[in-house]
Amino acid sequence: GQNIDQPTEMTATEGAIVQINCTYQTSGFNGLFWYQQHAGEAPTFLSYNVLDGLEEKGRFSSFLSRSKGYSYLLLKELQMKDSASYLCAVTMDSNYQLIWGAGTKLIIKP
Amino acid sequence: ETGVTQSPTHLIKTRGQQVTLRCSSQSGHNTVSWYQQALGQGPQFIFQYYREEENGRGNFPPRFSGLQFPNYSSELNVNALELDDSALYLCASSLASVTQETQYFGPGTRLLVL
């Protein structure tokens, strides 16, 4: 079966840095997405990693290790508006569907 | 704003009834995917349509069906509603059916089955 694991909930302080991990075991792998989802809203795209390494995009960076089945999302200079759920999703070879993790609820405290 | 709209925003139905949810994709997006998201869970893939044909399906029974129209709109139909069908239903549109294309999500329809 396909399995994607993320921590259920994390807490961090405004202005700090937080790393949200995602591990996956899937029968194939093409790439990994990170999405942000505020409560009651639709997911919005953050990043897509295909190759190993770190991709930086402003305050958000995403890392992928295909050999370890591991990714993380790094959020810097945290703001209160970053309080949301962060979902990782995997696309598999020759497959059009996204396999999603359950999401990590990130709580930012002043 | 992603340019993807869904209607209705909320819906209450009773067990055994039928429901139709609607989605309007971004202009020019020829692919739409539908997802079911239970509270506190990630979205589960229902099916995808590409140029008005079903292009793939997740582990959902046949009572979940869909249509895609030439004007970039689509429908999700669910027959014989069950209590477990209560969830947020999301549609997402993209430019092509290849997986690396970013999917743009609508705001969702929250369905409650009593």
Image: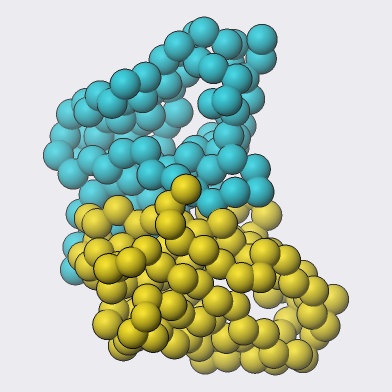
User: Which quadrant of the structure image shows residue B10?
Assistant: bottom right
Locate residue B20, reporting x and y percent.
62, 84
Locate residue A29, reporting x and y percent.
23, 54
Any part of residue A99 in sight: no
Q: Is residue B106 above or below residue B40?
A: below
Any part of residue A49 in sight: yes
Where does the N terminus of chain A fall, quadrant-wise?
bottom left
Residue at 68%, 74% (x, y): give it. B85
Q: Nearer the viewer, residue B68 or A1?
A: B68
Q: Nearer the viewer, residue B8 or A31?
A: B8
* In the image: residue B66, left or right of residue B107: left
User: Which quadrant of the structure image shows residue B50?
Assistant: bottom left
Q: Is residue B70 above or below residue A19?
A: below
Locate residue B97, reporting x and y percent.
24, 70
Tell me the colour chain B is drawn in: yellow
* In the image: residue A47, left or right of residue B20: left
